[in-house]
């Protein structure tokens, strides 16, 4: 009970963490490990679902912010959208109905994927179907999905504010990397 020997038995060895493990490596490893299909563990799935409620209340604004950041860093992608390809100013683009509609559509898909992040088959099917629709857009390449990663993370950071901790950033990075890789793979499959 209170003796030194029983206390010594309760001491757990210090765990060493591999600081070279990035969220991308975690996703890749989890997708390739036999029997592991969910990119996040149960606790991370719970946390992202809880956190996502803050995004869900502001999906339109978050989606527009994501696309604004995407087009700032990848202006060639804006040219692919006929509804707003010729808009030059940020204020006009932010208030453009076509962008608003597309941002809401994209965020609705992300909402469905993230709220079901622990259901691999459902999410994979959803994302494969979504990515297959992009084959009809002339010039759209599967790799373009990956350009959304940083703009998405920044938009989520802006929306969540102080609730966007380092831990939540890590979880969102794992989740969006998984989502975007799956979209990319789905479009590659559809193009075969």
Image (tube, rainbow, N blue to C red):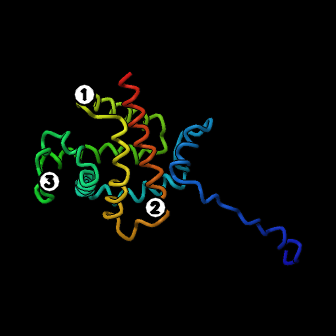
Under circle 1, the secondary element is helix
**Other residues around mark 1 within 10 Å, as few (<14) / some (14–19) / many (≥20):** few
Instruction: State the CA–CA distance, disc 2 to disc 1.
Output: 35 Å
Name which quarter of the figure residue 83 lies in.
top left
Instruction: State the CA–CA distance, disc 3 to disc 1.
Output: 24 Å
Name which quarter of the figure residue 69 lies in.
bottom left
Instruction: State the CA–CA distance, disc 3 to disc 2.
Output: 29 Å
**Other residues around mark 2 within 10 Å, as few (<14) / some (14–19) / many (≥20):** some
Task: Give the residue number, with chain letter if any, for mark 1.
Answer: 136
User: Which residue lies at the image location 48% right of the left edge and 51% below the top edge?
Assistant: 174
Task: Give the residue number, with chain letter if any, for mark 3.
Answer: 93
Q: Nearer the viewer, mark 3 or mark 2?
A: 3
Residue 160: give x, y in percent of width and height. 35, 64
> Which tag, 3 or 2, sits closer to the chain's start?
3
- Specify the quadrant that holds the C terminus: top left
Circles 3 and 1 in contact, beta carbons < 8 Å: no
> Which tag, 3 or 1, sits closer to the chain's start?
3
Q: Is residue 15 above or below residue 110?
A: below
Under circle 3, the secondary element is helix
User: Which residue lies at the image location 51% right of the left edge and 48% below the top edge?
Assistant: 24
Q: Nearer the viewer, mark 2 or mark 1?
A: 1
In front of the other: 43 or 161: 161
Compared across the picture, whether 115 is left or right of 90 comes to right
Task: Give the residue number, with chain letter if any, for mark 2.
Answer: 168
> Which tag, 2 or 1, sits closer to the chain's start?
1
- Specify the quadrant that holds the N terminus: bottom right
């Amino acid at each position: 009970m209170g003796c030194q020997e029983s206390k010594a038995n309760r001491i757990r060895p210090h765990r060493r963490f591999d600081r070279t493990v990035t969220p991308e490596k975690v996703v890749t490893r989890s997708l390739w490990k036999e029997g592991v299909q969910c990119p996040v563990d149960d606790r991370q799935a719970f946390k992202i679902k809880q956190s996502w409620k803050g995004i869900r209340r502001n999906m339109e604004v978050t989606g527009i912010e994501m696309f604004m950041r995407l087009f700032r860093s990848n202006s060639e992608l804006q040219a692919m959208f006929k509804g707003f390809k010729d808009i030059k100013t940020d204020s006009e683009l932010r208030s453009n109905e076509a962008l608003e509609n597309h941002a809401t559509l994209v965020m609705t898909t992300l909402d469905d994927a993230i709220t079901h992040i622990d259901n691999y088959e459902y999410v994979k099917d959803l994302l494969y179907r979504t990515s297959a629709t992009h084959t009809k857009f002339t010039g759209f390449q599967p790799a373009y999905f990956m350009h959304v990663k940083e703009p998405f993370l920044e938009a989520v950071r802006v929306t969540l504010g102080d609730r966007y901790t380092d831990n939540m950033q890590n979880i969102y990075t794992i989740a969006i990397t998984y989502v975007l890789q799956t979209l990319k793979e789905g479009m590659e499959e559809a193009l075969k």
